[in-house]
Image (spheres, helix red, strand yellow):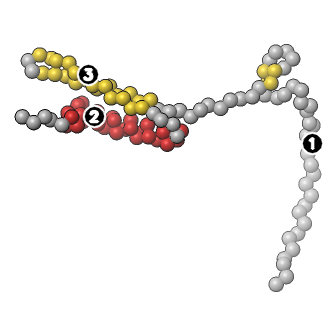
Amino acid sequence: MSKRPFIDTLRDVEGGGLLDELTDVQHALIDAIRLTNKGGELTIKLTYKPEGAGQMTIKADVKSKEPVLARGTSLFFLTPEGNISRRDPRQQNLELRSVDEEAPAPLRKAAD
């Protein structure tokens, strides 16, 4: 009697649902890897349990460890009161004012 290929067993686990899930998880993992340019992991765990009288159950567990983008930082300044602020308390304020707009000069045509 020849040995049954492992992929045939995987194809039958959860009525084919395991392979469908693995396909979706793998695509999501690859997308995250392409986005971050960092590695990731896909783990498949199969647990076999005898059920007596020549029977066995197989339980599948799929885990994915997707890479994540690095989070940015925000710069804050300390105030004399001990608070933090996005504005540097040592920087002077520059008063803003409106500027009157002049009408643009008419466009000139280049000589032919």
Instruction: Locate residue 71, reporting x and y percent.
Output: 62, 31
In the image, 42: left or right of 60?
A: right
Mark 1 or 3: the one toward you: 3
Instruction: Locate residue 80, reporting x and y percent.
Output: 87, 17
SS under mark 3? strand
In front here: 3 or 51?
Answer: 3
- Indicate the amino acid at tag 2: Gly
Q: Which residue is found at the position 82% from the left and 84% from the top?
A: 112
Position above or below: 91 against 96: above
- Indicate the amino acid at tag 1: Arg
In the image, 63: left or right of 52?
A: right
Q: Residue furthest front?
A: 2
Q: Which residue is found at the position 21% from the left and 34% from the top?
A: 6
Position above or below: 28 against 46: below
Instruction: Locate residue 95, reporting x and y percent.
Output: 93, 37
SS under mark 2? helix
Report the residue marked by disc 2: 17
Q: Which mark is residue 47?
A: 3
**Of callouts 3 and 2, the N-terminal one:** 2
Q: CA distance from mark 2 to mark 1?
A: 66 Å
Position above or below: 69 against 105: above
Report the residue marked by disc 1: 97
In the image, 36: left or right of 2?
A: right
